[in-house]
Image: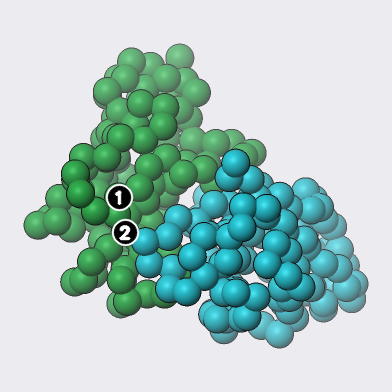
Chain colours: A green, B cyan
Amino acid sequence: AQSVSQHNHHVILSEAASLELGCNYSYGGTVNLFWYVQYPGQHLQLLLKYFSGDPLVKGIKGFEAEFIKSKFSFNLRKPSVQWSDTAEYFCAVNGSGNTGKLIFGQGTTLQVKP
Amino acid sequence: DTEVTQTPKHLVMGMTNKKSLKCEQHMGHRAMYWYKQKAKKPPELMFVYSYEKLSINESVPSRFSPECPNSSLLNLHLHALQPEDSALYLCASSQDGTSGWGDTQYFGPGTRLTVL
């Protein structure tokens, strides 16, 4: 069965610090990979996604993620965080044999201190 | 436009009430989803509709009854809920109703449900 693991449950950073959130998945086949963000009191928004091609994916608000197939990883990065990046971040996977079903990680709470 | 709308935003109901949640999208998407999300937890899939037909039911209790009247609308009918059903209920849609593979789900703002 597919699973997604986010290693950092709660991250606290100061503004301008660099961010890297880990995401590992377990699935032997081809995957689609996603990062969603949920700002306080708001709905899930798509940050970025990887389907195929360049493993370095750029998303909205200065975020990027790198797919490393050999490590089954899809880590999220941002060179300089802002207070407004405070939110819950979810990594999600859709495997090629998993019709219509997104598997979410447990989420990472990011708190950015001004 | 990647907007999915949900009504109501908040709902408080008793355990004997019957209520419905509504979801609407006008992006021409052919797959629609219901998720349940508890605080600080990831969304949990409940149902998937593909081309207006129920394609996935994640063993959800029968007190939750989904309905897809047309390709733009998705309802979730609630009856005899329990306090532990209190949660944020999210609707999502995606373009491809056939396999879900290579597809992106767009989420609505959710309905915050409280069961007393």
- Residue drawn at x 18%, y 58% as measured from the top left: A72
- Residue drawn at x 60%, y 74% as measured from the top left: B51
Whether labels 1 and 2 belong to a single chain: the reply is yes
Q: Estimate the x, y position of residue A5 in percent, counting from the top left.
A: 30, 58
Q: Residues within 10 Å of mark 2 (few under 14, many from 20)?
A: some
- Residue drawn at x 53%, y 59% as measured from the top left: B94
Which residue is under mark 1? A50
In primary-sequence order, the first of circles 1 and 2 is 2
Give me the C-alpha separation between circle 1 and circle 2. Answer: 6 Å
Q: Which mark is residue A89?
A: none
Seen from the viewer's position, the closer of residues B116 and A100 is A100
B5 vs A5, left or right, is right
Question: In what element is the residue under mark 1?
Answer: strand
Q: Is residue A95 visible?
A: yes
Which residue is under mark 2? A32
- Residue drawn at x 30%, y 50% as measured from the top left: A50
Q: Amino acid at mark 2?
A: Asn
Q: Does A8 sit above or below residue A106?
A: above
| Number of dots carrying numbers | 2
CB contact under 8 Å: marks 1 and 2: yes
- In the picture, residue B3 is in which quadrant? top right
Q: Estimate the x, y position of residue B20 in percent, counting from the top left.
A: 82, 67
Image quarter in which the N terminus of chain B is found: top right
- In the picture, residue A57 is in which quadrant? top left
* Chain for numbered disc 2: A
Residue lying furthest front: B28
Q: Estimate the x, y position of residue A86 in percent, counting from the top left.
A: 48, 30
